[in-house]
């Protein structure tokens, strides 16, 4: 079984739509094997986004540190066949305005890159509700950073027991 990390960002928590989003993952059969709510420090966010500065620049990294630091987040690990690909498909494109309807970002947000970059706007990051591991390497790094082995659970769902 494959595992992936999902983070419900501060905008999700502040809008009180965490339950709706979590339910979408459960409805497709992905299993939650670990979950916690924390307020990440800038240092922790930098460890999570360890390669963002190199790939996208310091401005993007600073925006992410500010954004994830503005309130608590809910982090959870999903497990299931093709969990990474399934989760990425459900989340949608990074820019919510470009995400198609039916995806989490497409259904719950309309933030654009231009709005995030607007110098007159207080927003310095793309408020896009959720983070999902991009690939197997990132999933392993992120899960290991956010969760210890003792915080991840093994159990059988009803579907696994009877199907």
Image (cartoon, rainbow, N blue to C red):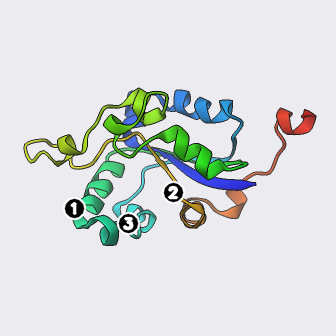
Q: Which mark, by number, is residue 134?
A: 2
Q: Is residue 42 above or below residue 16?
A: below
At 35% from the left and 31% from the top, the residue drawn is 109
Residue bearing mark 3: 46
Residue bearing mark 1: 59
Q: Quadrant of the N terminus?
A: bottom right
**Badge 2 vs badge 1, beta-carbon distance below 8 Å:** no
Q: CA distance from mark 2 to mark 1?
A: 21 Å
At 50% from the left and 32% from the top, the residue drawn is 18
Q: Secondary structure at mark 3?
A: helix
At 82% from the left and 37% from the top, the residue drawn is 157
Residue 60 as seen in the image, left or right of residue 93: left
Q: Which mark, by number, is residue 11?
A: none
Q: Secondary structure at mark 1?
A: helix
Return the residue nearer the eye: 118 or 75.
118
Q: Position of residue 77 (x, y in %)?
A: 62, 50
Dot 2 or dot 3, earlier in sequence: 3
Q: CA distance from mark 1 to mark 3?
A: 13 Å
Of marks 2 and 3, the one in the foreground: 2
Q: Quadrant of the C terminus?
A: top right
Q: Is residue 40 above or below residue 43?
A: above
Q: Position of residue 104 (x, y in %)?
A: 47, 33
Dot 1 or dot 3, earlier in sequence: 3
């Amino acid at each position: 079984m494959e595992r992936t990390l999902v983070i419900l960002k501060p905008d999700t928590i502040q809008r009180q739509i965490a339950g709706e989003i979590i339910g979408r993952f459960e409805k497709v059969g992905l299993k939650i094997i670990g979950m916690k709510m924390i307020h990440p420090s800038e240092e922790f966010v930098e460890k999570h986004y360890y390669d963002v500065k190199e790939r996208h620049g310091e401005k993007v990294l600073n925006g992410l540190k500010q954004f994830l630091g503005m309130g608590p987040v809910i982090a959870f690990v999903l497990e299931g066949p093709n969990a990474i690909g399934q989760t990425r498909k459900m989340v949608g494109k990074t820019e919510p305005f470009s995400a198609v309807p039916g995806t989490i970002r497409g259904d719950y947000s309309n933030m654009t890159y231009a709005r995030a970059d607007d110098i007159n706007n207080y927003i310095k990051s793309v408020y896009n509700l959720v983070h999902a591991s991009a690939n197997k390497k990132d999933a392993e790094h992120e899960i290991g950073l956010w969760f210890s082995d003792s915080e991840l659970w093994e159990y059988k769902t009803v579907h696994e027991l009877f199907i």
